Image: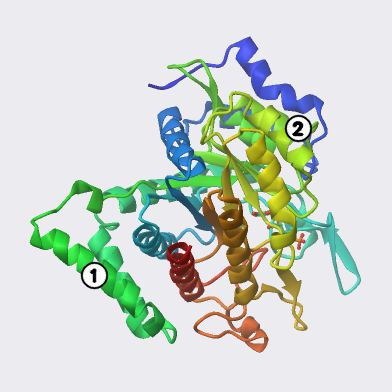
Amino acid sequence: MGFVTVNAETHAGRQTWRSLPAAQQPEYPDPEALREVIADLESYPPLVFAGECDQLRDRLGAVARGEAFLLQGGDCAEAFDQIAADQIRNKLKTLLQMGAVLTYAASVPVVKVGRIAGQYSKPRSKPTETRDGVTLPTYRGDSVNGFEFTEAARVPDPERLKRLYNASAATLNLVRAFTTGGYADLRQVHAWNQDFVRSSPSGQRYEALAREIDGALNFMHACGADPEEFKTVEFYASHEALLLDYESALTRVDSRTGRLYDVSGHMVWIGERTRQLDHAHIEFASKIRNPLGVKLGPTTTPEEALALIDRLDPDREPGRLTFITRMGAGKVRELLPNLVEKVTASGAQVAWVCDPMHGNTFEAASGHKTRRFDDVLDEVKGFFEVHHGLGTHPGGIHVELTGDDVTECVGGGDEIFVDDLHQRYETACDPRLNRSQSLDLAFLVAEMYRGQ
Ligand SMILES: O=C[C@H](O)[C@H](O)COP(=O)(O)O
Ligand SMILES: C=C(OP(=O)(O)O)C(=O)O
């Protein structure tokens, strides 16, 4: 199975978005330089294969049918200087630990998808940033420009798209090694969770759940069970399909089916700022076979949600479309029910996933963007309450997190206070849950799942 060279018709299919308005695109100073980079990218090998994307779509179909749970998490924005092995390992380790807890508590498969190996571009609320009277283009992620507040760094550079590709390839390579080479063994992951329960201030509240998992694993061991499924784990890569020049350069025809796949990652999503129905991002997404996510914020109407389904999932294929709702803790209980009711009444089977981060951001007095762990948790609680009330499936969570002990979000078991934020605030854009907060969230969501 592979990808065939692109014929004229297919090339056209990959480019129809170019005739439509495309929000959040970099303004490159030299169009010819961009064209040369695109030509190079079009010659590079795929980062993922179509068959893997199809497998993920099948897994997400189980989520849409209420038979599985999606755990999607990782950096707000990956950075070229943050792909050291230990940084990748810590992120993966945290997601695996969260997945193990959720699998046991929910008693359904947990589909693990990283915001990883491609999440290097960011939509921004403002095109410029001003500091001390100096105004420069805003930072849009390492794949576009530099984080440093200098004129030179902030100029969009198309060569960064090649670094995006290479950093994604290197990260994906290591993730594949970790997840298939024994590092992800379930028994090892459980041992990490036991360490967390023993060492974290809130650990004792999870001791009962950790003990139950321990008992289940010991029972399996006593029966002589040593299944292959314990030793490796399915893990997928996802990112926001924001830079359409990059995504279309990595869109290839699958030789098995003749269909187009964006082989920059297994799953891509369209963000809240670029999901306009008659704009380029939705047009691009409608042309590719990958499983898709779409972020839905508090202004989303049921009519928009239904129109997005018609555009992106005309064949009503469970697993093709995931709605990632990011309403805000104070709005989710009021705004989500109408959306879910109208979409469910239409007969469409989408996967519903909660992003409890993007509706809960605020600026601390120190100037740091941050989020309260309690708000994050409350939005997930509201998401579960809404679906439980409607008899629909709370299909998953989509979390900005890191496996490192950063101080970016306040609260959590290892209480972080607003005055602590400066201590280890490392995110390039939005504040992430740190390792302890992420595991806290997993155990608390597990309790929600069991309580429903
Ligand atoms: O992650 C989402 C957006 O890129 C981010 O929230 C935008 O941040 P801004 O409002 O500081 O531009
Ligand atoms: C930009 C993001 O979110 P949203 O589009 O929901 O603001 C994101 O998830 O990185």
Quarter occupied by residue 365:
bottom right
Residue 163 appearing in the image: no
Residue 411, position as x, y percentages in the image: 59, 81
Mark 1 vs mark 2, CA separation in Å = 50 Å
In the rendered image, residue 176, in percent from the top left (x then y), is placed at 35, 47
Callout 1, which amino acid?
Asp
Side (left or right) of 208 relative to 369: left
Q: Quadrant of the N terminus?
A: top left
Asked if residue 81 lies left or right of residue 224, the reply is: right
Q: Residue at x 58, y 66 (%)?
A: 381
Question: Ligand 1 is in which quadrant of the figure?
Answer: bottom right
For label 1, the residue is 214
Query: For the point 76% across and 32% down, which residue is it?
Result: 280
Where is 196 relative to 391, above or below? below
Residue behind label 2 places its C-beta within 8 angstroms of ligand 2: no
Q: Is residue 331 at all visible to an observer of this figure?
A: yes
From the image, tell me which residue sits under label 2: 280
- At mark 2, the secondary structure is helix
Q: Nearer the viewer, residue 271 or 314?
A: 314
Compared with 450, 241 (above or below) is above
Query: Tag 2: Cα neighbours inside 10 Å, few (<14), some, or many (≥20)?
Result: many
Cβ at disc 1 under 8 Å from ligand 2: no
Percent position (x, y) of residue 292? 58, 38
Residue type at tag 2 = Ala
Return the disc, 1 or 2, that comes first in the chain's sequence: 1
| Residue 117 drawn at (x, y percent) | 50, 48
Q: Which secondary structure lies at badge 1?
A: helix
